Amino acid sequence: MAALHKRTIKNLAISGMRLLLLAGLLLGGGCQSLRPAASPAPLAVKVRFLLTFDDGPSIRTDYNPTLAILEQLARNDVQNGIKGIFFVQTRNSNGGGSEAGKNIMRITYAQGQVLGLHSAEPAGHVKHVRMENEQLNQSLINGIDDIRHITGSNPEFVRPPGFLFDAETQELYRSQGLKMLLSDVNARDGVIHVFNVSLRRRSHIRSELNRVYEEVGLRQLPVVHGVVPVVVTFHDVNTYTAWHFTEYLHILVEQAVDIGLPLAAKPFFDQTEEIVEAARYRTVPPLITAK
């Protein structure tokens, strides 16, 4: 028993010495991993938000979110006259396939917004990757024709529903003269879970912008006329988005400033021609398939 007692005291003493040694290393800077992280180098280029909207137009008559968003783009307390790209569903019976939907697309275009193709299926939001090539090709032709009847020219940009694409869909886009535009910051407002609310919109947008910060720092995003166009995606059929859209504008600006993402004097694109040019630089080149 005495031997066991001595061994226990010895072990405690050794443990105590190890703790003292570890504390000395930590306090003396021996543990490099606990040094304060160096502040990231300031970015040398500024960014500008290119706003995009999916799934519209809405044809609701009680409160039309598409029209509400258009009003806030034109007049708000962040930057008036903002322009964006609206990826529309041209033949959805609850959207562009109705006379009301066509009229809202005309209003959208008349306000200097750009119309892009999202879907031209009467069933609505059908994933392009799930369609046979012949069906998708005809759908693209129909959608291009629908938009041309409103704007007088073929649409230049396409966004696949659900952001899902493959080499075959991209080849069909290319064959119809369409360029695929994806997104850097997705507000994730396209799905309504029971309640139409977004409780994490601020933290989520911050997370998306942190990734953009890294990509800009690594020069992974193109610079167009001295700024990096950052593509942001909302859904103009969502009433919550419309109710809070000006707040979303504030969140984008505030979170960008807070993480050190430098903004242009005008943080949002507000000229139609500039939007089109910036979007061209952000489109995704076709995938190369093995022969």
Image (cartoon, grey):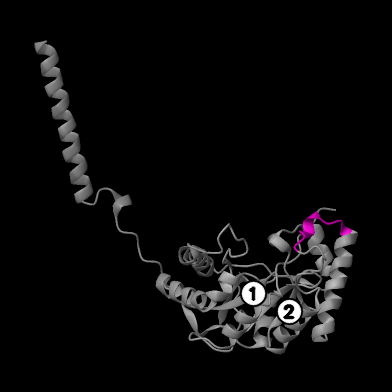
In the structure shown, which secondary structural element does the residue marked by tag 2 occupy? strand
Which residue occupies the extreme left position in the image? 2
Which residue occupies the extreme front position in the image? 62
Quadrant for residue 196, please give it: bottom right
Q: Nearer the viewer, residue 284 or 196?
A: 196
Q: Position of residue 160 (x, y in %)?
A: 73, 64
* Total number of numbered discs in the rendering: 2
Write the start and end of the magenta stretch as one range.
125-133
Q: Position of residue 135 (x, y in %)?
A: 88, 61
Residue at figure coordinates x 77%, y 64% from the top left: 124
Given the image, on which type of amino acid does mark 2 rest? Leu
Residue at figure coordinates x 58%, y 75% from the top left: 242
- Tell me which label, 1 or 2, sits earlier in the chain: 1
- Compute the Cα span from label 1 to label 2: 10 Å
Residue at figure coordinates x 23%, y 52% from the top left: 29
Residue designated by label 1: 52
User: In the rendered view, does 42 fall on the left or right side of 85?
Assistant: left
Residue at figure coordinates x 87%, y 72% from the top left: 142
Quadrant for residue 147, please give it: bottom right
In the structure shown, which secondary structural element does the residue marked by tag 1 occupy? strand
Q: Is residue 270 magenta?
A: no
Q: Position of residue 202 (x, y in %)?
A: 46, 67
Q: Position of residue 259 (x, y in %)?
A: 42, 70
Quadrant for residue 82, please give it: bottom right
